Image: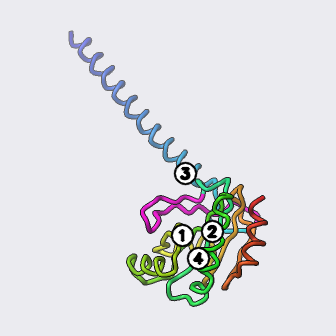
């Protein structure tokens, strides 16, 4: 009787251990798979390579992920409310977004290096009639990944998600934006 009880306890213990081990392995596999999915994109910007991921909530509360925009030409524009050239180029960005939006064009504004509050950024967007999504780079992590050294800085990403051109400084003109759009809209 004691032998059967011992065997039953041993079997139950072994079964519990196996279930526990399987749970640990499944959790480790999920972490590895999540890491592999996020590591498919580079962590720093380089012309000719996939653009680093941007995955943030927009100022209007929508989640914006650059990887989800694949198949569309994208202009990623780093800016700040205090930046004069940024302010000067916003009307051209607004016009070009409106002009090419039906062709899938996305302008993604990345507010960075800005101590203004969310309310201040929203007021700026309203005053400049911004009609495209804007996210905030609160810890300047995106600026570091994209190697932003001055504002404004713009990155032109083609339909396959590959970074095709970078422009540091501004303001960009309508004609210049037309030429860049043609390059990334192929």
Residue beneath the point at 37% across and 34% down: 20
Query: Taking 186 as reference, is 45 above or below it?
Result: below
User: Looking at the rendered structure, which numbered label has been put on residue 131?
Assistant: 1
> Which mark sits nearer the N-terminus, 4 or 2?
4
User: Looking at the rendered structure, which numbered label has been put on residue 97?
Assistant: 2
> Which mark sits nearer the N-terminus, 3 or 4?
3
Residue beneath the point at 63% across and 53% down: 40
The mark closer to the camera, 3 or 1, is 1
Disc 2 and disc 1 in contact, CB within 8 angstroms: yes
Residue 62 placed where, x, y %? 46, 60
Q: Distance of mark 4 from mark 2, alpha carbons?
A: 16 Å
Query: Taking 20 as reference, is 70 above or below it?
Result: below
Q: Distance of mark 1 from mark 4, alpha carbons?
A: 16 Å
Magenta span of residues = 48-66
Q: Distance of mark 2 from mark 1, alpha carbons?
A: 8 Å
> Which mark sits nearer the N-terminus, 2 or 1?
2
Residue 132 placed where, x, y %? 55, 68
Secondary element at image label 2: helix
Residue position for label 3: 35
Which SS does the magenta portion mostly show?
A: loop
Secondary element at image label 1: loop
């Amino acid at each position: 009787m004691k032998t059967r009880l011992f065997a039953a306890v041993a079997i139950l213990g072994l079964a519990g251990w196996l279930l526990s081990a399987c749970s640990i392995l499944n959790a480790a596999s999920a972490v590895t798979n999540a890491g592999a999915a996020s590591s498919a994109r580079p962590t720093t910007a380089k012309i000719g390579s996939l653009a680093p991921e941007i995955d943030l909530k927009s100022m209007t509360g929508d989640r914006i992920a650059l990887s989800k925009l694949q198949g569309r030409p994208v202009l990623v524009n780093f800016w700040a409310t205090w930046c004069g050239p940024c302010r000067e180029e916003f009307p051209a960005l607004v016009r070009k977004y409106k002009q090419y939006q039906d062709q899938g064009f996305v302008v993604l504004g990345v507010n960075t290096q800005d101590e203004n509050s969310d309310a201040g950024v929203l007021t700026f967007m309203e005053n400049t009639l911004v009609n495209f999504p804007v996210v905030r780079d609160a810890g300047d992590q995106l600026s570091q990944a994209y190697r932003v050294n001055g504002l404004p800085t713009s990155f032109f990403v083609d339909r396959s998600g590959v970074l095709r051109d970078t422009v540091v400084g501004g303001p960009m003109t309508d004609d210049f934006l037309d030429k860049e759009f043609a390059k990334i809209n192929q």
